[in-house]
Amino acid sequence: MRENTKVIHIGDKVIGGNNPILIQSMTNTKTEDVQATVSQILKLEAAGCDIIRSAVPTMEAAKAFSEIKKQIHIPIVADIHFDYRLAIAAIEHGADKIRINPGNIGSTDKVKAVVEAAKERKIPIRVGVNSGSLEKELVAKYQGVTAEGLVESALDKVKTIEELGYDNLVISIKSSDVLMCIKAHELIAKQTLYPLHVGITEAGTVIAGNIKSSIGLGIMLYEGIGDTIRVSLTGNPLEEVKSAKLILKTLGLRKGGVELVSCPTCGRTQIDLIKLAGEVEDLIQDIDLDIKVAVMGCAVNGPGEAKEADIGVAGGRGEGIIIKKGEIIRKVPEPELLSALREELMKMQAAI
């Protein structure tokens, strides 16, 4: 993790410097529908989302922030496109940060009005640049959409805001091209101290998006680039948070929570391991333990394969075993494996 990035406050959260990398997601409800939006945000909070972003396409959506803020517990970011008045309204109604592309806002006077509103309330501006909206002159200059063009575009917009007397900024440069996105972040990390929000935009469905995001974010985070992350998926935002947490845990950038390991199944498997592994994955979401749980399909090799796990299950013909630190502690019928594991996990949690 880069320790020299500028420290920025977003509501009660802090990014940059040597602060932990935070997880973001975005609601897919109509922001105007306060009840639906709040309901989704509360679920995302419970899943581990640190910062939430909501679209502000209308004045009604901007005004809804006032009511939404009263019912949630994490900072909310207003996502603005084109209309500077929506940015100002969102700020006035409690947005903890705004996301804009100054190039889409319009004249310098309009950008200045947004900056002045943010400055008055001391909220950060996330300067967002996307490969799909790179300026024509930069596309021509670099003979296509390139990492260099994305960086130049972002830094140019940052300079515009700095010249208006504000430096409470976060930078986001995104592309659906994983390698271009990585290169752009490697370039910009050498040229600015502003914190970076990283992600692979329009990554795709849950499977494709997770693969692209894991590769892109994994490389950037391993190189020490990134202060907040979002895994962009076409699907339930809860999947974004689950994936982001796993990426951070895998890289050793976030501690706590249960880690699940499971075997890929083979001809020796005699239980419905795929179903069981999915059920265990759901079970551990609400378990507050920093442990490793193993799900193995073979009672012969299971104890040995799971010996590095704190607790695990392994299946046999119509039955299974509960394993702790490689030692068999219980044998139960297959239908009772999940409940037996739950019981043992509750004992471990109660013992803390």
Image (cartoon, rainbow, N blue to C red):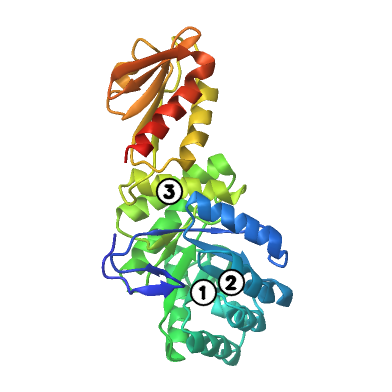
Q: Amino acid at mark 2?
A: Ala
Q: Looking at the image, do the residues carrying marks 2 and 3 touch, with CB atoms under 8 Å apart?
A: no
Q: Nearer the N terminus, badge 2 or badge 3? A: 2
Q: Looking at the image, do the residues carrying marks 2 and 1 touch, with CB atoms under 8 Å apart?
A: yes
Please tell me whether mark 1 sits on a helix, a strand or a loop: strand
The residue labelled by disc 3 is: 245
| Residue at the (28%, 63%) spot, across then down | 2
The residue labelled by disc 1 is: 97
Q: Amino acid at mark 1?
A: Lys
Q: Nearer the N terminus, badge 2 or badge 1? A: 2
The residue labelled by disc 2 is: 78
Q: Residue 82 sits in which quadrant?
A: bottom right
Q: Residue 166 sits in which quadrant?
A: bottom left
Quadrant, the C terminus: top left
Please tell me whether mark 2 sits on a helix, a strand or a loop: strand
Alpha-carbon neighbours of circle 3 within 10 Å: few (<14), some, or many (≥20)?
many
Image position of 56 with respect to 251: above or below? below
Q: Residue 346 sits in which quadrant?
A: top left
Quadrant, the N terminus: bottom left
